[in-house]
Image: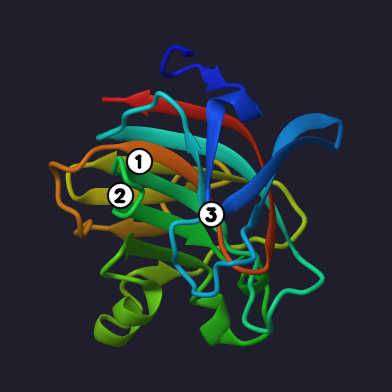
Amino acid sequence: MEVYGQPIALTPNKLTPVQVMMKAVELDGRKAIRVTNDTSVKKDDEATFVRINEVHFKNGSIEVNLLSRLLPDAPAHARGFIGIAFRINETNDRFECIYIRPTNGRAEQQLRRNRSVQYFSFPDFKYDRLRKESAGEYESYADMGLNEWIQLRIEVKGTRAKLFINNQAHPSLIVNDLKLGEQTSGAIGLFVDIGTEGFLKDLTIKNQ
């Protein structure tokens, strides 16, 4: 396994698919992993990610480059959902996640723009519950679009997580109360949701 803090080559032998399909591809002259949801998954905000083998994470930073497209059969509510799951437990049924909705970043409706970035916690705090109970607190705006490489970096410490996009000096989203608590730790996964054709490369993990 690579030393933490050094780029991890994303190859299928270092990944375990969880309710997704994956394969190694070349995109824009660079090696990447293509990920799509298993067609049996019908709900949003489920455990749909490629899990990074032999990685245990509690506090630190996770950085990756992502690109998403809409699949030809994507449902009307699809937004190119793609992001990072972290502190995943052994059975893949408890984890934290921050993802982006690239179609929203340049939408003409301000409300959709305000929902470009999303935090959720599986299984109890999906986006719809958080939006209903704490409107606007767990999602925010950021400039982004489909079919372009987007750098995400998540910094995690205790119950706080910050999301930085494309090397911004300031975070696009701050979560001050990660729902699984400060003692939670586990694996890292690269997340896609319904209707997304996702591409992933250049993963770096730093533990604290």
Q: In which quarter of the image is the C terminus?
A: top left
* Residue at position x 35%, y 71% in the image: 126
Q: Is mark 3 on a helix, strand or loop?
A: loop
Q: Tell me the CA gap for discs 2 and 1.
A: 5 Å
25 or 27, nearer to the observer: 25
Q: What element carries label 1?
A: strand
Q: Mark 1 points at which residue?
A: 155
Residue 102 at x, y percent in the picture: 64, 65
Question: Amino acid under label 1?
Answer: Glu
Label 1 environment density (alpha carbons within 10 Å; few <14, some 14–19, many ≥20): some
Q: Name the residue under label 3.
A: 19
Report the disc number at residue 161: 2
Question: Amino acid under label 2?
Answer: Ala
Front disc: 3 or 1: 3
Label 3 environment density (alpha carbons within 10 Å; few <14, some 14–19, many ≥20): some
* Residue at position x 55%, y 25% in the image: 14
CB-based contact (under 8 Å), mark 2 and mark 3:
no
Say whether residue 150 is visible.
yes
Label 2 environment density (alpha carbons within 10 Å; few <14, some 14–19, many ≥20): many
CB-based contact (under 8 Å), mark 2 and mark 1:
yes
Q: In this view, does 203 lie to the left or right of 121?
A: right
* Residue at position x 46%, y 28% in the image: 53
Q: Tell me the CA gap for discs 2 and 3.
A: 25 Å
Considering only order in the chain, which callout, 3 or 2, is on the residue closer to the N terminus? 3
